[in-house]
Amino acid sequence: MTNKRISRLRGASVDYAIAAFRVVIGFLFFCHGTSTLFAWPTAPHSGHTAAVGAWPSWWGAVIQLVCGAALFLGLGTRIAAFLASGSMAYAYFWSHQPDGALPIQNNGELSAIFCWALFLMIFLGGGALSLDRLIAHGVRTARVDDEAAAGEPGSTDELREVNA
C-alpha cells in the first residue's frame, strides 16, 4: 500500500470512529433527558420526574432530550454539542461544585465527562453517517448538477471530483 492509500484508510476509520462516539454520547445524553422527563427507561436518581418548567431540572432535561436526539442523528451536531456542553458545565458548577473542589469529591464526574466529550464534538463534527453530512452532500450534488446544466466550464465529472 502506498502512503496515500494508508492516509485515506486512516481518515475513513477516524471518521467512522467519530460517528460511533457521536452516536453513543448522543444516545446516553438522550436517555438522561427521557429519564428525568418521563422516568423512562428508568426513574431518575431522585425517584421522581421533573415538574414541567422547573428550573433547572426540567429545562436541563429538555436540552438533554433534544440535543441527545440531534447528536444521535448527527443533525446540527456542532450547535447541539455546544448547547449540551454548556448545560453540563452549568450543571457541574451549579449542582456539584459546591460539594467539593474535584469531581471525584462532589459526584460530578458524569457532568464533567459529558461536558468535555460534548465540547470535543463541537470541533469534530458529526463524522460519517450523520444527517449533517448527508444534507451537505445533497446540497453539493445539487449545486454541481445546476452548474453543469447551466453550461459552466468543466464537465460534470470534473465538478463532482472537485466538490467531493
Image (cartoon, rainbow, N blue to C red):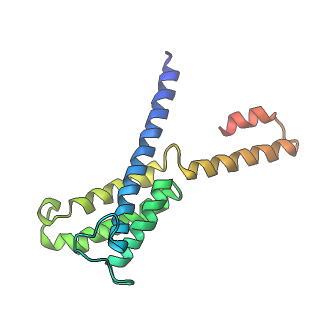
Measuring 49% from the left and 45% from the top, which residue is drawn there? 127
Residue 82: give x, y in percent of width and height.
43, 62
Q: Is residue 126 left or right of residue 38?
A: right
Residue 134: give x, y in percent of width and height.
61, 48
Query: Front-most of 129 and 160?
Result: 129
Measuring 51% from the left and 43% from the top, which residue is drawn there? 128
Residue 63: give x, y in percent of width and height.
41, 70
Query: Front-most of 23 and 88?
Result: 23
Q: Is residue 99 left or right of residue 148?
A: left
Query: Front-most of 159 and 16?
Result: 16
Query: Front-most of 31 and 70?
Result: 31
Q: Is residue 51 left or right of residue 74?
A: left
Residue 47: give x, y in percent of width and height.
23, 74
Q: Which quadrant of the rendered structure holds the C terminus?
A: top right
Hey, which residue is sitting farthest right in the picture? Answer: 151
Location of residue 150 with respect to 109 vertically, above or below? above
Location of residue 119 with respect to 159 vertically, above or below? below
Q: Does the rendering let one see residue 70?
A: yes
Measuring 48% from the left and 50% from the top, which residue is drawn there? 125
Res 27 → quadrant: bottom left
Q: Is residue 151 left or right of residue 104?
A: right
Q: Does the rendering let one see residue 119?
A: no
